[in-house]
Amino acid sequence: MKSVIVYYSYTGNTRKVAEILAEYLESKAETTLIALKTLDESDKFLSQALRAFIHTRARLEPTDFNLSNYDLICFGSPVWAFAPAPAINTYIDRCFGINQKPVVLFTTYGSGVGNQRCLDYMQSLLIQKGVSSFKRFSIQQFKTQDKEFILSQIRSYNIDLKS
Ligand SMILES: Cc1cc2nc3c(=O)[nH]c(=O)nc-3n(C[C@H](O)[C@H](O)[C@H](O)COP(=O)(O)O)c2cc1C
């Protein structure tokens, strides 16, 4: 059994959660982390927010879009203007081999405004790709350094290969 975590992180919060989730899953299944890197993301808050808000697709550095070998697939994004980061939109558009597989969606956020909308958008893209089993969790940015808290959230959502 294998799992994969695909994530985008600009300031490191989502990366932290992705790494803790990987450590947790690794005890149950071989786990791969895929960190998305963009070729065209802005470094300006307003531009990042606008691009995310209108669901822009980012240009990605070369990465593996083939998820056929994995049994559990996780996607993580920061919430940007009530939406996923553009890198995640691109990856979800282009990935394959996920039909009917269990998916975990996770976000990190600041105030929490727009968090559900962000998760709903990621989920809607994946439903169009034949995914029907979702688990979702979110961690506020101030809690992303708190490993025990994050593990407790992961455990409480019962995230494992039986999702
Ligand atoms: C451009 C931008 C837009 C953001 N929009 C939201 C938002 O709509 N709602 C929210 O709760 N947090 C928002 N945040 C806060 C981020 O979601 C939060 O800091 C997140 O943990 C960053 O993750 P990262 O460190 O992995 O990049 C925004 C941050 C940025 C940079």
Image: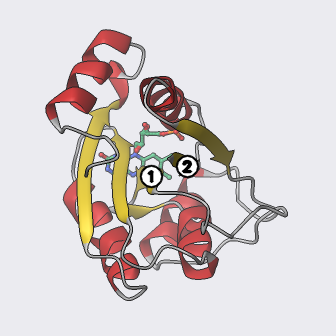
**In the image: residue 119, left or right of residue 68:** left
Ligand 1 located in image quadrant: top left
Q: Is residue 4 shown above or below 103? A: above
Residue at the disc numbered 1: 74
- Visual colour scheme: secondary structure
Looking at this rendering, what residue extends furthest in the left direction?
156
Give percent across and percent down for residue 154.
27, 31
**In the image: residue 21, left or right of residue 119:** right
Front position in the image: 27 or 53: 27
Q: Is residue 90 shown above or below 41? A: below
Q: Is residue 106 shown above or below 141? A: below
**In the image: residue 100, left or right of residue 62:** left
Mark 2 is surrounded, within 10 Å at the Cα level, by few (under 14), some (14 to 19) or many (20 or more) other residues, namely: many
Residue at figure coordinates x 43%, y 85% from the top left: 129
Type of amino acid at the residue the image marks with label 1 = Cys
Any mark on residue 7, and which? none
SS label for mark 2: strand
Q: Is residue 75 shown above or below 127? A: above
Type of amino acid at the residue the image marks with label 2 = Val
Front position in the image: 77 or 34: 34
Give percent across and percent down for residue 133.
25, 67
Residue at the disc numbered 2: 4
